[in-house]
């Protein structure tokens, strides 16, 4: 189920290509799975072999696998609607300011079409309480809604909405087996020697803004084992990831190149150029990714620690992702 060409790509990447470790999982429409784990969970200061039990920092896979999924669960439960204004749930948002942000919808935030900027160095603003308050009061430079601008800020706000409607912190939400916000450092994959925190990160969120917010935010903070993330791909492929109507809404086109939860197959797509037109996927900065192609009846997960020990390396993670996707899809009969 894992073609020889795929295996060769990953063996080369983890032995001669500069990638510390890689964990690949594949699942078909019948629930048959196959996995391949190669390389190291940590290269320095000591080497630790990678195993299937190690938890990876999933980075922006937090967006679809937790935040967007929980928003759609709340829609299915009647607790909110995708076309509700953000200000309905965060009435203190941009208090005493003339801003269009209050009128932007949850749908626009999910699809990155709300006009918010991509990123800001929130971790330089102060402590977690200050950051949480300032995110709501910052006079964000807003574009007109409609254009897709991938935005961590939008998902931070969605995380706040989830906390508001459920009355608890994101860290207190129940997660599927194999996913966690509180990984065991001894069983976690090392990421970067962080210049801001001045230490090697292991079992601690890599994203600086999520770290400054206590480790969990709507845009980052989720960790997962290969089995845990592959189970998400299986649920998306075979059904059961969300109630049927919500899952259908999650996967159909909702904005240029995007569904409510994922990125659709398109030129340059991370899942490769052999995918069917409505295949979906998402990646994370640390080197993670999940893809599902219903037409090819295949889902796959590639988890790596490409930022270990530094993000400033020349390894082509996007090229590897595409090559893995193409070799897997080419093997489907």
Image (tube, rainbow, N blue to C red):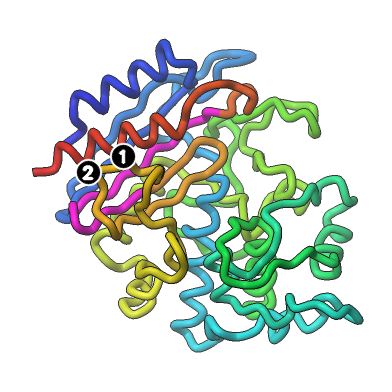
Compared with residue 104, is residue 155 higher up or lower down, i.e. above or below? above
Crowding at mark 1 (Cα within 10 Å: few <14, some 14-19, many 20+): many
Crowding at mark 2 (Cα within 10 Å: few <14, some 14-19, many 20+): some
Q: Position of residue 88 (x, y in %)?
A: 69, 86
In magenta, the rendered stretch is 291-306
Residue depicted at 61% across the width and 79% down the height: 105
> Is residue 278 left or right of 94 when viewed as pictured?
left
Mark number, residue 33: 2
Q: How many marks?
A: 2
Q: Nearer the viewer, residue 147 or 202?
A: 147
Residue depicted at 55% across the width and 84% down the height: 83
Quarter of the picture holding the C terminus: top left
Mark number, residue 25: 1
Q: Secondary structure at mark 2?
A: strand
The answer to whether the residue labelled 2 contacts the one labelled 1, judged by CB atoms less than 8 Å apart, is yes
Does 316 appear in magenta? no
Q: Nearer the viewer, residue 160 or 101?
A: 101
Q: Position of residue 182 (x, y in %)?
A: 61, 48
Residue depicted at 74% across the width and 48% down the height: 209
Quarter of the picture holding the N terminus: top left
Q: Nearer the viewer, residue 253 or 219?
A: 253
Q: Secondary structure at mark 1?
A: strand
> Is residue 118 left or right of 71 when viewed as pictured?
right
Q: Is residue 169 visible?
A: no
> Is residue 64 left or right of 100 when viewed as pictured?
left
Does 294 appear in magenta? yes
């Amino acid at each position: 189920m894992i073609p020889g060409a795929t295996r060769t790509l990953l063996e080369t990447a983890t032995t001669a290509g500069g990638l510390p470790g890689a964990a690949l999982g594949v699942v078909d429409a019948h629930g048959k799975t196959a996995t391949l784990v190669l390389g190291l969970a940590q290269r320095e200061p000591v080497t630790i072999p990678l195993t299937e039990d190690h938890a990876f920092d999933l980075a922006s896979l937090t967006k679809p696998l937790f935040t967007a999924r929980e928003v759609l669960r709340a829609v299915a439960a009647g607790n909110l609607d995708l076309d509700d204004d953000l200000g309905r749930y965060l009435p203190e948002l941009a208090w005493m300011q003339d801003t269009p942000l209050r009128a932007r919808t949850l749908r626009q935030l999910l699809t990155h079409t709300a006009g918010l900027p991509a990123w800001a160095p929130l971790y330089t603003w102060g402590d977690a309480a200050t950051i949480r308050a300032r995110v709501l009061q910052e006079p964000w430079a807003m574009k007109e809604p409609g254009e897709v601008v991938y935005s961590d800020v939008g998902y931070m706000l969605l995380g706040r909405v989830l906390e508001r409607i459920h009355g608890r912190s994101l860290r207190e939400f129940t997660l599927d087996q194999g996913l966690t916000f509180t990984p065991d450092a001894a069983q976690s994959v090392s990421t970067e020697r962080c210049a801001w925190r001045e230490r090697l990160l292991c079992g601690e969120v890599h994203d600086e803004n999520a770290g400054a917010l206590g480790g969990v935010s709507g845009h980052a903070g989720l960790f997962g084992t290969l089995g845990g993330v592959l189970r998400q791909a299986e649920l998306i492929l075979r059904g059961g990831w969300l109630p049927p109507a919500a899952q259908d809404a999650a996967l159909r086109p909702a904005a240029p190149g995007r569904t409510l939860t994922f990125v659709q197959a398109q030129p340059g797509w991370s899942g490769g150029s052999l995918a069917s037109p409505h295949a979906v996927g998402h990646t994370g900065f640390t080197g993670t990714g999940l893809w599902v192609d219903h037409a090819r009846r295949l889902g796959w997960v590639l988890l790596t620690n490409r930022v270990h020990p530094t993000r400033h390396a020349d390894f082509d993670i996007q090229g590897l992702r595409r090559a893995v996707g193409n070799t897997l899809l080419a093997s489907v009969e």
